[in-house]
Image: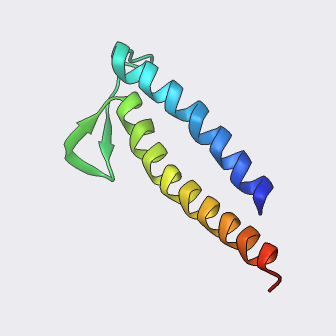
Amino acid sequence: MKRLAIVTTIITGVLLILGLADWLTNYNWSNDQDPLFGNPHILLNDGATVLVAVGLLAVVTALLWTLVLRKDRDHQRGR
C-alpha cells in the first residue's frame, strides 16, 4: 500500500504542475472549454479542469497516506 501512496503522490504532483501551468498561462491548445461535471453554465479551461481532478486525487492520496502511517504505527506497537 505504501507503493501505491508513493505513486499517487507523484502523479498528483505532476498533474498539479501541468494544471497550474495551463491555468496560469491560460493556454487553450484545443480552443475549447470544458463544462464542470456536465453543467453547461460553468465552463472551465483545460487547466482548471485538471486542477479540479487533482483536488479529488489529492484527497485520495491523503487518505492513502493516513492509512499507511496508521498501519506502520500499529505494526511498530506489535499489534
Considering every residue shown, the one lying at the far bottom of the view is 79
Counting from the top left corner in percent of width and height, residue 72 is at 75, 68
Counting from the top left corner in percent of width and height, residue 33 is at 32, 30
Q: Is residue 3 above or below residue 33?
A: below
Quadrant showing the N terminus: bottom right
- Where residue 67 sits, quadrant-wise, is bottom right
Relative to 75, 16 lies left or right: left
Q: Residue at x 64, y 40 (%)?
A: 11
User: How many numbered circles does the render carry?
Assistant: 0
Considering every residue shown, the one lying at the far front of the view is 77
Counting from the top left corner in percent of width and height, residue 6 is at 72, 48
Q: Residue at x 43, y 25 (%)?
A: 20
Q: Is residue 52 above or below residue 75?
A: above
Q: Residue at x 73, y 46 (%)?
A: 7
- Residue placed most toward the observer, 43 or 47: 47
Quadrant showing the C terminus: bottom right
Colour mapping used in the image: rainbow
- Residue placed most toward the observer, 58 or 33: 58
Relative to 76, 23 lies left or right: left
Considering every residue shown, the one lying at the far left of the view is 41
Q: Residue at x 83, y 82 (%)?
A: 78
Q: Is residue 25 above or below residue 35?
A: above
